[in-house]
Image (tube, helix red, strand yellow):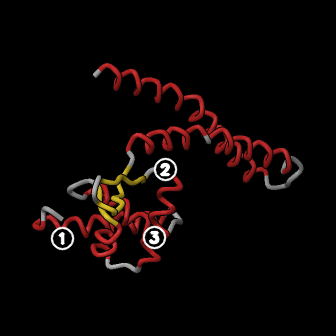
Amino acid sequence: MNAQHNEPKIKEMVEEVGVLMEQRGMSPMPGRVLAFLLLSEPPYRSFYDIQEFLAASKSAISNSLQKLMDSGIVDYITFSGDRKRYFRVNLKKWMEVSKNDFSKIREIEAFFKKTLALRKDTKFLEFNEEIERLLEFHQFMAAKIPHLIEEFEKRYNKE
């Protein structure tokens, strides 16, 4: 890392992101790799730079990078005369992935509708009411999110 005086803070942040990913049901290592790439100077690193900083096995780093590349939020670049691949966060792709994730709220909405249809004869009406409330929340969010994305894009494109 260029800024060695920040290394303890960077390591702390990398661990925080790993824990956050784990709390969300994911493997912590891809989160650590992602955080390291976001905090790195330069904002791209070789496989061995990542492995050394995270003190992780080759397979753990390889699997994490593959998972992040499969999602599209990490890619790599090469430099003429250098055989190494340098991994980086693809922020434009991450934005696309985020927008796509928000659009999937309709799929969840459909799931709740089907769930309620199958539970229509149940005796647990309070539980169904909570599902209905969750469905209404998703419907509300699904209606608002496209407008919020559009508003953001208008603001962003003005600058």
Picture quadrant of residue 14: bottom left
Q: Amino acid at mark 1?
A: Pro
Q: Position of residue 96 (x, y in %)?
A: 48, 39
Judging from the image, what secondary structure is the residue with disc 3 in? helix
Quadrant occupied by the C terminus: top left
Question: Alpha-carbon distance for marks 3 and 1?
Answer: 24 Å
Judging from the image, what secondary structure is the residue with disc 2 in? loop
Q: Name the residue carrying label 3.
A: 62
Q: Amino acid at mark 2?
A: Gly
Question: Alpha-carbon distance for marks 1 and 2?
Answer: 29 Å
Q: Position of residue 132 (x, y in %)?
A: 70, 43
Q: Position of residue 30 (x, y in %)?
A: 44, 65
Which is nearer the N-term, disc 3 or disc 1?
Answer: 1
Q: Position of residue 6 (x, y in %)?
A: 14, 64
Residue positioned 79% across, 49% down in the render: 115
**Is residue 75 depicted above or below 158 in this figure?**
below
**Is residue 156 depicted above or below 127 in this figure?**
above
Q: Name the residue carrying label 2.
A: 72
Residue positioned 44% across, 69% down in the render: 28
Toward the viewer: 82 or 92?
A: 82
Residue positioned 25% across, 69% down in the render: 11
Does residue 151 appear to the left or right of 115 in the view shown? left
Characterize the local packing of mark 2: few (<14), some (14-19) or many (20 or more) Cα atoms within 10 angstroms.
some
**Is residue 133 depicted above or below 66 in this figure?**
above
Residue positioned 45% across, 70% down in the render: 62
Which dot marks residue 8?
1
Judging from the image, what secondary structure is the residue with disc 1 in? helix
Q: Amino acid at mark 3?
A: Ser
